[in-house]
Amino acid sequence: MSQARIPRHWAHWPPQVPRHLDIPATHLFQNALASAARHPDKPLFIFYGAVTTHGRFLADCEHLAGHLQQVCGVKRGDRVLLYMQNSPQFAIAYYAILRADAVVVPVNPMNLSDELQHCVQDSGAQVIFAAQDLMPQVLPLLLPVMLPVLHEGQASAPGVGLKHAVVATYSDHLPPDTDLRVPDFVRAPAQTFDVPGVVGWREALAAQRAATPMQAGPDDLAVLPYTSGTTSHPKGCMHTHRSVMVNTVARPLWMGSLPDSVQLAVLPFFHVTGMQNAVNGTIYLGATAVILPRWDRDVALECIQRFRVTGAQLISTMVVDMLSHPHIERFDLSSIVSIGGGGAAMPEAIAAKLKALTGLDYIEGYGMSETMAATHINPLQRPKRQCLGIPIFDVDARVVDPSTFAELPVGEVGEIVVHGPQVMRGYWRKPQADAEAFIALDGKRFLRTGDLGRVDEDGYFFMVDRLKRMVNASGFKVWPAEVEALMYAHPAIQEVCVIGVSDPRRGETVKALVVLRATHRGQVSEADIVAWAHEHMAAYKIPRIVAFVEHLPKSGTGKILWRELQQQAATANPSSTESA
């Protein structure tokens, strides 16, 4: 790197941490093999007190990989959907797919059939790992010949492509008894599905089929997480074993994590942050993760105390909830040495309260599905609040003019662009999206993040606004174009514009401004639209506020002026119907 471009943030680099990271040029499954060899009897996952050791994990992955290859016909490079809540089975399925040299397609378990169908069709997946409570969403997407029998009266979906499903039961990994509060869907006993191509997890494991030798290398595709944006449908982010390995190794090194670390694993595994930190990072280290499928502050606090948790990745709303516990002082939190997260800035008052209670700073970071988690993290020895952090190993991040791409000076607001080894190869089968997402600067390929930010005099990055349309609801990214595309399926909707509005609990929430068809006016209420949305999209995407309007403002070319509506909402109290 030339003298002119020596980054100013290097002055605040974590001590004893190298600036360059030599990433293992190996298949990700090698990490599981190594940890099982070193720590075969050590707890890898703790699930309400039940332990899955590193050795047991490896054996289950091998047998399920054999099932994928011998029964489902999965070959190198095939895509396999993974549709579950946080659980040991999620991680086992993830690594079984990798062991079969296939590509993991993680799907948000809040997604319903309409959203799931796009991932199936776009990825070309023919096989899915799914939890039994989610099978009602999967069954309509299996071979259409089954549908008239299983779902009388529903329309079939020809050509979807799912031929095989392996069904997991969370309670298989519960201890015989536990005093921890367990959600009903986790406690539920095993169900059976008498459907061709559908097999239970236990049955698939019991056959103990052997997988063939691994053939994939570091530059083969490994994970295809879907993300949205300005388009109406989510796009698959192509990540290789090499690009996934980057943050698998980088974050533990940055945070000083050790094989004896115990991670509270509550961020969703389908999302790259939870996936990398709690699953891939834990396996790489040979460490332990305490898994919760959903946030429950009482259970989380008890697990921290009981299992001597050393690190926790929590979004700001979780920290707010935890610190508001009326008896938090009764819990022993002394084992925690690091706590952090991202997705939304931590309020100053909450960060101060956390510091007073634990003596710890909340370490914020920044990343995207396109970068397989972090490109920026605050240094532990000198974090700044409400700050994205500094670029980590081998990342070149800049703030540029969104129109000219000229780099801007300190303090000026522009678009954040990033170049680094964790950046995706591109979008799955979307060359036009790639052309819009990447730019060349100084001979390097940079990803346009769509986030507006600034850099201070120390080289720390701060978020200012968003260039792309996006609503940040409790840390979940909601892309209005995707929600609009789903809502246009409602027969009463003529036009719709989705925006974000302030919400005291979620930070932002989703609002839909709807123009009804003339034939449905007076026949459909705002609450009816919300109820319909509950049946057709993930809960975090649902418009909590619906307002009927006579028309939507448009530009001279006919485009809906969503920015104008967004600004109006920011300065006025919306007259609309709210629904939880």
Image (cartoon, rainbow, N blue to C red):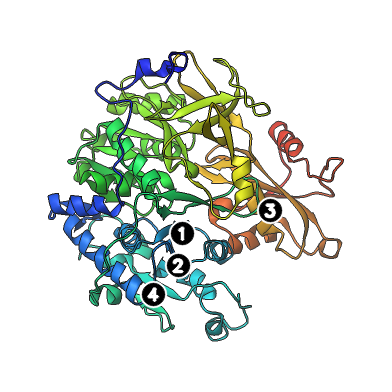
- Are the residues flagged by discs 3 and 4 in contact, CB closer than 8 Å? no
Residue 134, label in figure: 2
Residue at (65% x, 53% y) in the render: 232
- In the picture of the structure, the residue carrying the numbered disc 3 is 484
Q: CA distance from mark 4 to mark 2?
A: 20 Å
Residue flagged by tag 2: what amino acid is it? Leu
Q: Residue furthest front?
A: 443
- Are the residues flagged by discs 1 and 2 in contact, CB closer than 8 Å? yes
Instruction: Point out the tag, 2 or 3, that comes first from the N-terminus.
Output: 2
Residue at (45% x, 58% y) in the render: 105
Q: Does residue 282 appear to the left or right of 552 in the view shown?
A: left
Coordinates of residue 50 in the picture (x, y in percent): 21, 58
Q: Residues within 10 Å of mark 2 (few under 14, many from 20)?
A: some
Coordinates of residue 88 in the picture (x, y in percent): 29, 58
Residue flagged by tag 4: what amino acid is it? Cys
Q: Residues within 10 Å of mark 3 (few under 14, many from 20)?
A: some
Secondary structure beneath dot 2 equals helix
Q: CA distance from mark 3 to mark 4?
A: 36 Å
Instruction: Point out the tag, 3 or 4, that comes first from the N-terminus.
Output: 4
- Whether residue 327 is visible, yes or no, is no
Q: CA distance from mark 2 to mark 3?
A: 24 Å
Secondary structure beneath dot 1 equals loop
Residue at (55% x, 29% y) in the render: 416
Residue flagged by tag 1: what amino acid is it? Pro
- In the picture of the structure, the residue carrying the numbered disc 1 is 109
- In the picture of the structure, the residue carrying the numbered disc 4 is 72
Instruction: Point out the tag, 1 or 4, that comes first from the N-terminus.
Output: 4
Give the position of the N terminus as an image quadrant: top left
